[in-house]
Image (spheres, rainbow, N blue to C red):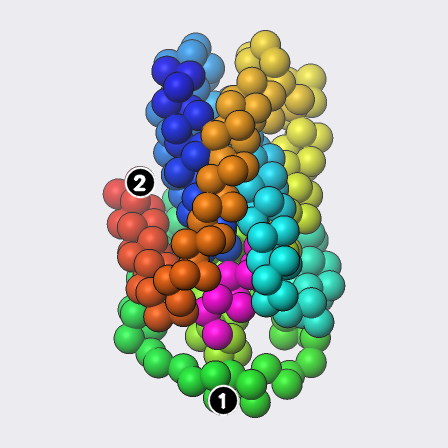
Amino acid sequence: MLFLVVLVGGLSGFLSGLLGIGGGVIMVPLLFWLLPRWGLSQDVAVPVALGTSLASAACFTFSGALGHWRRGIIDWRRVPWLITGGVLGAMAGSTLATWLGGVVVKKSFAFLLLFASYRMAFSPFSRKEGASVRERRGLPFFIIGLATGLVGSFFGVGGGIVAVPFMVLVYAFPTLEAVATSSAIIPAIAGAGALAYIFHGWGKAGLPPYSLGYVDLLLWGLLVAGGLLASQLGVWVGHKAGGASLRRAFSVLLLFMAIKLFMG
């Protein structure tokens, strides 16, 4: 069972480096399945899964960001705006997730993912077009960051699944640059969300033995052990594959996430 956690951490880390996401789309379903089997009630298992996923995503994306930084492809001009909005959104999203069931939000988000999946697969953008569109100033990127943090923390997925499509579809970022920039902002956003889950879970009854609030330190350590090196492999594969392949891969990921949300 513990080996499965390490294996899922490796896959999550690989996707994190490849696509600029936190990897929560893989980790959260595993933790939803695993934690009740370890004796946790549903009310505790859900926030523990989300908080632990975010804490792991912060580590994966930080590792991936180092790989992209060494290749000089991160758009640092947008990063402060994205992080500022993202941290505020993460605090709000994690708070909402501890209060709400989120059924309506999940279904609405699933429709958004279906639309983004279609656009990522079938809407071409040229680098010339992207260069002109991206002259817009910081406020729109603050809003993207806010949405990234809100949705990412609410679902425990880090937020790259929101940030990358927005940057590609709305501001015509080259896909690889969007992935790299997402990797640079998700550590702060996911970290803020994880801290909020620690705060909201502090002193709660029924938590796992090795935990800080709603973050299970044992599972976090196993996930990170599996994912740190794998995230560097993902960065390498992403740069070899190129933008068109990454867009298709991201489109499939969005479709997969939408189907899972529709199915509950």
Residue 128 screen position, x and y as percent: 49, 89
Q: Is residue 226 visible?
A: yes
Of the two numbered discs 1 and 2 in the rendering, the one whose residue sits closer to the viewer: 1
Magenta stretch in the rendered image: 174-183
Task: Name the residue rendered at 39%, 28% in the picture.
Answer: 7
Between the residue at mark 1 and the residue at mark 2, the CA separation in whole angstroms equals: 41 Å
In this rendered view, identify the residue nearer to me: 86 or 18: 18
Query: In front here: 182 or 10?
Result: 10
Quadrant for the C terminus in the image? top left
Looking at the rendering, in which quadrant would you find the N terminus? top left
Residue nearer the viewer, 46 or 18: 18
Asked if residue 91 shows in the view, the reply is: no
Instruction: Identify the residue at horizontal 34%, vertical 53% (top origin).
Output: 253
**Residue position for label 2:** 264
Magenta stretch encompasses residue 264? no
Specify the amino acid type for callout 2: Gly
Q: Main secondary structure of the magenta part?
A: helix
The numbered disc on residue 128 is 1
Give the answer, above or below, for where 85 lies relative to 264.
below
Residue 89 lies, in percent from the top left, at: 64, 53
Residue sitting at x 60%, y 35%: 55
Mark 1 residue crowding within 10 angstroms, few (<14) / some (14–19) / many (20+) = few
Give the percent coordinates (x, y) of residue 171.
52, 78
Q: What secondary structure is found at the residue carrying circle 2? A: loop
Quarter holding residue 194: top right
Q: Residue at x 43, y 85 (%)?
A: 126
Q: Position of residue 245 (x, y in %)?
A: 33, 65
Q: Are marks 1 and 2 in contact (CB under 8 Å)?
A: no
Q: Work out whether 223 lies above or below 189.
A: above
Disc 2 crowd rating (10 Å Cα; few below 14, some 14-19, many 20+) is few
